[in-house]
Image: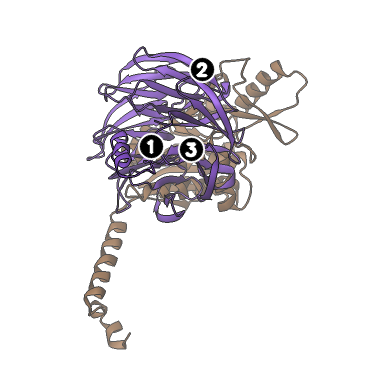
Chain colours: A brown, B purple
Amino acid sequence: MPTTARARPHHRFRSPVGALLLTLIGLASSSVATALEVRIAFIGDQDGDGWRGAAQGIAEANAQGRFLGLHYTLEPSAGPAVDADVSAIVTAVAAERLAPIAAANPGRAVINVAAADDELRADCVPNLLHTLPSYAMRDDAETQWRRKHPESEAVAQAWHADFEKYAAAQLNKRYQAGAGRPMSDEAWAGWAATKAVADVIARDQRVEPAALLDSLHGDIAFDGQKGAEMSFRDTGQLRQPLLLVEGGRIVGEAPVRGVVDTENLDSLGLPSCLK
Amino acid sequence: MRALFCLLLLLLSPLVDAATGRVFVSNEQDDSVSVIDSATNEVIKTIPVGKRPRGVGIAPDGSAVYVAVSGDNVIAVIDPHTLEVVRTFPSGDDPEAFAVHPNGNIYISNEEDAKASVLNPATGELVAEIEVGIEPEGVAISPDGSRVIVTSESTNMLHIIGVPEHEIVANIVVGARPRAATFSADGSTAYATSEISGEVKKIDVASGKILGRMPLADDKAKPKDVLVSRDGRQLYVAGGRANRIFVLDANSLEIIKAIPVGKRVWGLALSRDGKRLYTTDGVDHQVSVIDTGALDVVATVPVGKFPWGVAIDD
C-alpha cells in the first residue's frame, strides 16, 4: 500500500472490489454501532467465582444478542451508586453491604450471587434479587432428603461440576472452557444472574432499569439448566431445585421425590413475604 | 408425494426401493435400533449401531435409514431391507437431532459448537456450516425445502435458515429451551415446543411473528417433538414427563385431547397416510402406537432401553 493512499484512506480502494470491500466494512461497522448496548455493573471481587459466572452469562448473552442487535457489557463498579444507564447490578459481596447498595439504586435490580443469609430474603427489599439459594432452602432440601434417607449426611448445593442432566453437562463444559475451573455454587448464581437478565431483555427489549426490574419480577420461565422452570419469588429469591451431594457425589435432587411434590419449588425456603 | 416419486422411479429403473413399512426406533441406552413391522406391531430385529443412538431419519428415496450415533460421532446408515448397518460417516461432535432435506442432504445441529451442519450422506462431505445460538437441537425442513428451522435450546431461539443460501433469514425468541419444530404442509406456518416453559408456539414463517401460544395443561409437561396431522388440522405434541400426547387444534392451539402413553414421551413419527402416530416412551422402554382417528393407543411395543428417535419407512 503506497504511503499516499494511507494518508488519504477514503481513496485507498481504487478497484471495484476494493470499493465493495469498503462498503461491506462500512455496513458491518454501522450494524455494530446500531446494536443496543446493555450495561450490567458488577460489585465485588473480580477474582471470584461470582464474577467468573456472571462473565460466562454475559458471553452467552452476547451469543444470543448478536442475532437480535443487543450487546452486553459487565463493568466492575465500586458502588454503591452506579451510572444512570446501567440496566442492572450483580453483586458478590457480604450480606451487610447489600442494603446500602439496594438503597442507592431504587428501581434498579441488584442481584445477589454470594450471600445466602435468610434475613436478606425475609426483608423483601423490592429491588434486591437472589440467584444463590438461601440457607433455609438448603436446610429444607436436606430435611426432605433425610426423611427418605435417615442415615445420609448429604448436603444441599445449588450446583455441582459433575451435574449432567437437563443440559447441565453443556453448561459445565462451557464454564470450564471459559473460566478454566469447575463451576461452583457462586459461579452458577453469577451465571444465572446475567443469563436471566439477558433472557428477559431478549423477549421484551426493555433495558431501562425500572422496566427490566418489572420484567424480572414477572413469570420469566427461566431455564437455569436444572430442569425446572424458574422465577423470582416476591422475597427476591430465585425458585430452583437443589442437588444433594454426599462424599462429593450427587445423590439426589430436591424437592425430593416421594417426600414432597417435585414440582413444588416453594417447598424449599421462605415461599413468600410475611404479610 | 414420495409414493409418486417411487412410482416414477419404478417405471424408469429396476433399482428401486419399495417402502418396507418398517418403523425404526433408536434405543439411547442400548446402543441399538429396534425395527418394528407396522403391520404386526412386533419387533422383527434389533440392530447394534454404536454408542448412544438418538436422531433417526429416512432418505427421500427410501434407500437408507440414518441414525445419529452420539457416542461415536457418526451417522450410521442402515439398509431398510437387509436391516444391516452398511456404512457410517462422520457427523461432527455429539450428533443428536437432524432432518433430511428433499434433496437428500442431512441438516444436523452440533450442540457443542453452536452450529448447524449440512452433510451429503452419499459422500459424507460437509456441504455447509451455519452459526446459530447455544445448544442447537431441533431441526425442521419445510416441505418445499426452502427453509430450515434450527432451535437453540440455551439461547431460546428459532433460527430460520434459507436454502440454498444457508443464511439465517430470521431469529425468533420463544420460551425457554425450544426443543423441536415442524412446518405446516404449505410451509407458511411453523410450530415449536419449549421444554422448560412447557408450551407450544405458532409462528408465521414469512414474517417471523408469533401467532399464538398454548401452555400445556399439565404442570409436569416438558414437551419435545411436535408434528402436524396430514390434513393440517391437528398438532401432536409429545408431553415428556406429563406421559401424554397432547392433541391441539392447529389453528387455535386449543387442546383437543391428552392421550396417556408411557413415561417420558419424546419422539414422534406419523405414518404417510396419517393414520398411525408412533411415540417413544423413554422411561417405559416402549413405543406406543396411536390411532389418529380415535385418538387412542392401539398397541404398545416393548423396545430397547430409553427409546429416543423414531422414523417410518413407508
Q: Where is residue B98 in the image (x, y as percent from the top left)?
A: 43, 41
Say which quarter of the image contains residue B147.
Answer: top left
Q: Quick one: B133 or A147, which is closer to the camera?
A: B133
Q: Is mark 2 on a helix, strand or loop?
A: strand
- Pointer 3 local density, CA inside 10 Å: few below 14, some 14–19, many at least 20: many
Residue B55: which disc?
3
Q: Amino acid under label 2?
A: Thr
- Between the residue at mark 1 and the residue at mark 3, the CA separation in whole angstroms equals 31 Å
Direction from residue A169 to residue B4 in the image, left or right: left
Q: Which residue is drawn at 57% across and 52% down?
A: A177
Q: Residues within 10 Å of mark 1 (few under 14, many from 20)?
A: many
- Mark sitting earlier along the chain (3/2): 3
Out of A162 and A205, give the one closest to the viewer: A162
Q: What residue type is labelled 1?
A: Val
Q: Separation of disc 2 and disc 1 at Cα?
A: 42 Å
| Position in image of residue B119 (x %, y %) | 43, 51
What is the secondary structure assignment of the residue under circle 1? helix
Q: Name the residue under label 2.
A: B300
What residue does disc 1 label? A200
When the figure is inspected, residue A234 is found, relative to residue B178, above or below; the finding is above
